[in-house]
Amino acid sequence: MNTFDLERLLLAAWPARETTSLHGWTVLTDGGVTGRPNAVSPLAFHGKLGEAIAAVQSHYTARHMRPTFRIARGACAPVDLPEVLISHGWKPTQETLVMTAPLADALSRLPSVEGVVLSETCPPAVDAIIRETSASAVEYEERRGLALRTPHPRAFAMIGDSDNAQAIGLSVIVEGQAAVFLMRTHPAHRRKGLARRVLAGLLGWARNNGATGAFLQVEADNKPAVSLYEAAAFKSVYSYDYWREETIP
Ligand SMILES: CC(C)(COP(=O)(O)OP(=O)(O)OC[C@H]1O[C@@H](n2cnc3c(N)ncnc32)[C@H](O)[C@@H]1OP(=O)(O)O)[C@@H](O)C(=O)NCCC(=O)NCCS
């Protein structure tokens, strides 16, 4: 699967509240807090570049949001967009890896699933972890909305009891590929193998529901998470950055 295909799957698996098109670019708008659903995904393009960039600036500033592009290395239209943005004072930040694994390889590296509860709807204990790990009420609302908007088939996974989750995750199958989101272990329960079990639960569910591969995104400097995924046979296939105008000091 090439980078353009993976980017399209990513957009389908994690839909923003509003998706519009500007000059062929996909413009995502949500609560303005997290990265992916509040950025332009430039996968196809027509028209004049200067006008298109100005239209993006107007779109976000009208909503009191910072204009942002999310540009995948190796899948960007037009190809000279990064160069043009640099010349206008935009900068890339927050490098994020896209990692993939064949399900058979990942499952052969993961433990057998014990105590992982799967559910198509978001259990209250999972919702509570999303709230506790969000920095603000607005961030919680955005993350919760995104999780509830994910397409089916999907599975929320948790370890814990109905009042108190220790670790959670979410998988969504799009076109036979399992996207993995929301991997979180409560700080008091880290490094006990819980995330590894959650991942095993999600990927086992995905295989039973017809998926053959898995993909996920992780910030390049998130060493614990990158180690977790590498140990489960995931490999980085490309990365993307968020591009924003440098603020004047
Ligand atoms: C990433 C996260 C989910 C890992 O949860 P966890 O339950 O502590 O992970 P596990 O105990 O199952 O660890 C499995 C493997 O991951 C790697 N790992 C986990 N935490 C690590 C750390 N702090 N440093 C290095 N490697 C780490 C190790 O390879 C570990 O295996 P080992 O303990 O046998 O060496 C957890 O740190 C977390 O919730 N972080 C904040 C949210 C986040 O960043 N989520 C990922 C978004 S992509």
Image (cartoon, rainbow, N blue to C red):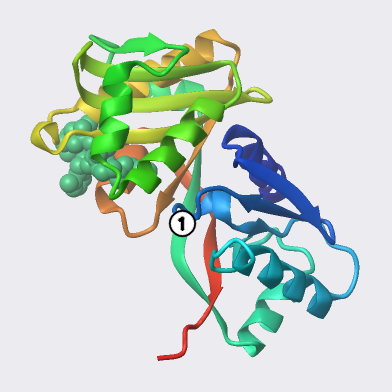
Identify the residue position indicated by label 1 in the image: 96
> From the viewer's perspective, is residue 205 above or below residue 75?
above
Furthest-left residue in view? 188
Residue 199: quadrant of the picture: top left
Q: Is residue 171 left or right of residue 21?
A: left
Secondary-structure class at tag 1:
strand
**Amino acid type indicated by mark 1:** Thr
Residue for point 65% across, 87% down = 88
Q: Is residue 81 above or below residue 26?
A: below
Q: Position of residue 248 (x, y in %)?
A: 46, 90
Q: Residues within 10 Å of mark 1 (few under 14, many from 20)?
A: many
The image position of residue 218, as x and y in percent, is 41, 48
> x and y percent of residue 66 in the render?
54, 68
Q: Is residue 160 left or right of residue 122?
A: left
Q: Left or right: where does residue 234 sit relative to residue 7?
A: left
Quick one: 236 or 140, which is closer to the camera?
Answer: 140
- Could you tell me which residue is drawn at 71 percent across and 82 percent down? 84
Say if residue 227 shows up in the picture: no
Q: Position of residue 228 (x, y in %)?
A: 29, 39
The quarter in which the N terminus is drawn is top right
Is the C terminus in the top left, top right, bottom left or bottom right quadrant?
bottom left
Observer-nearest of 112 and 8: 8
**If the picture is divided into quarters, which one holds ligand 1?**
top left
- Ligand 1 near label 1 (Cβ, under 8 Å)? no
Q: Quadrant of residue 85?
A: bottom right
